[in-house]
Amino acid sequence: MATHFPALKAKVRALPDTPGVYLMKDRLGRIIYVGKAKSLKKRVASYFQAGRARALRQQPKIRTLIEMVTDFDILEVKSEPEALLLEGKLIKQWRPKYNTDFTDDKRFLLVRVDSASELPRFALTRLKKDDRSRYFGPFAHSGLLRKTLAQMRKQFGILLADTHPTKLPDGRYRLYDDARAEIYGQVNEVTPADYRGRVDAACEFLEGKSREWLASLRAEMLARSAKQEFEKAAELRDVVLALERTLARTRKFTRDFTQLRPTDAALRALQEALGLDAPPAHMECFDISHISGTFVVASMVRFTDGRPDKDQYRRFSIKSFVGNDDFRAMEEVVARRYRRLIAEQKQFPDLVVIDGGRGQVSAALKAFVGLDCMPPPLIGLAKKAETIIFPDAREPLNLKLDDPGLNLLQRLRDEAHRFANTYNADLQSRKIRESILDDFPGLGAKRRAALLAHFGSIEKLRAATAEQIAEVPGFGDKLAAELHAFLRAQ
């Protein structure tokens, strides 16, 4: 078994027991396999359990995959169908080496509307073509989708793929020549313009823009139930659930897909602009914040797949010196961050971004030299002209202001700046609140420190009783009572 498995096992133990998608990565950080899971914890763990792994390795392809995995990421979702949709979407996006199931979209159904036809029909397909048709989906539940289309045919009077209308001498069309015309309860002889209105209404429904029909179906369901027509009420209930779930899946997938495409484009643009081996799935950015050399703090924010990964954000107070020196502060926090990752045997990010110019970048590079390790790809982003600074001999780079890669770097940098400023403001506010102790006579620095160490904050000290204050070393009953009275009067 590979030597990196113990580190991965530790990561597996922290996984949630929820549905989701996992992304297996090789030593270069490339996504080589995407899988879905009802339980992320159980499914991912199976790759690194001795007995299960031995069984998997009997298959040459899976054995090779397991041997190449050095890390993984997860994306949590709310249900198995959502995991199925997300799995397919990510496979199509990243085209991992060891995935084949989704290369031809066999798992998903789309609704195709042949808009160029005089009488557009609604059909199911698994392949989206550039043929001027409108497509809706994909949909995880084929059964629900078919039930939805059957109900839409009754409600909107649309045609499905199994119909063959007859053109009449006056230019109108007879949609059905059998009993279906009566069953569906719609006008059977229509002009192309009249029918087009039906198509538009049905398409709006698939886009989630119409709620009136669902509301009326729910009302009818309740009315039938009140009349004790339970069979019909149950039938309507099934229809409502099918419609709701079909529309919900479409809206979620469309929203996720439209968010993912620009982010994917930005990551690939960064890869090309910076000469990286792969799109930077994990990026970390550092910023220093201070006011005239006081309250000097630093922030580090992390983006995963182009989006904020707030659980990984970190804040730093400067410990190695007092004063105003951005370069020393940057060297300190970068060294502290990656010294810890080395100690925890965690991978470095794909790209480190420094908020600043040549001096800040050199300070960050000096931190890696002090750690005696090879730095990951490292750049600076200088605010004045949004210039990208490299730590080597490459010339500074200025991308177009609308370049998606630059825009992603700006979002990352601005988030680091916001996070650092928030921490700075918190410290200032805390310091202002604590300065009230300076006004109490006879309370030196040592006793002030003892109070704050004991209670943790000025707010908790204010809420304490005189007896609780007296428990702090250096305080007798009299001084504690005086301080208590002082704080209550403020």
Image: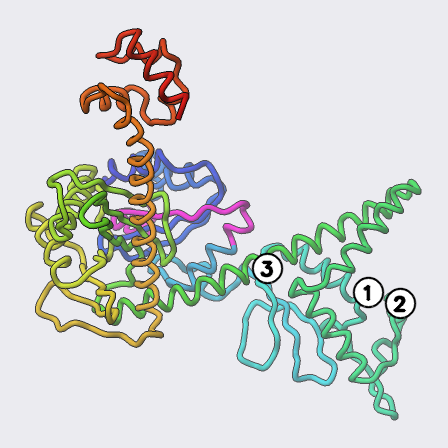
User: Distance from label 2 to label 1 (Cα)?
Assistant: 7 Å
Q: Nearer the viewer, residue 459 or 278?
A: 459
Is residue 355 visible in the rendered structure shown here?
yes
Mark earlier in primary sequence (3, 2): 2
Q: Amino acid at mark 3?
A: Arg
User: Distance from label 3 to label 2 (Cα)?
Assistant: 29 Å
121 left or right, relative to 154? left
Q: Which residues are magenta?
A: 58-84
Q: Amino acid at mark 1?
A: Lys
Seen at 35% across and 74% down, the residue is 402
User: Distance from label 1 to label 3 (Cα)?
Assistant: 23 Å
- Quadrant of res 33: bottom left
Q: Is residue 127 above or below residue 425?
A: below
Which residue is identified by label 2?
185
Seen at 76% across and 73% down, the residue is 159
For numbered disc 3, what is the local secondary structure? helix
- Image quadrant for the N terminus? top left
Label 2 packing within 10 angstroms: few (<14), some (14-19), many (20+): few
Expressed as whole percent of the image width and height from the top left, the position of residue 246 reads: 65, 57
Which residue is identified by label 3?
251
For numbered disc 2, what is the local secondary structure? loop
Expressed as whole percent of the image width and height from the top left, the position of residue 143 reads: 67, 55
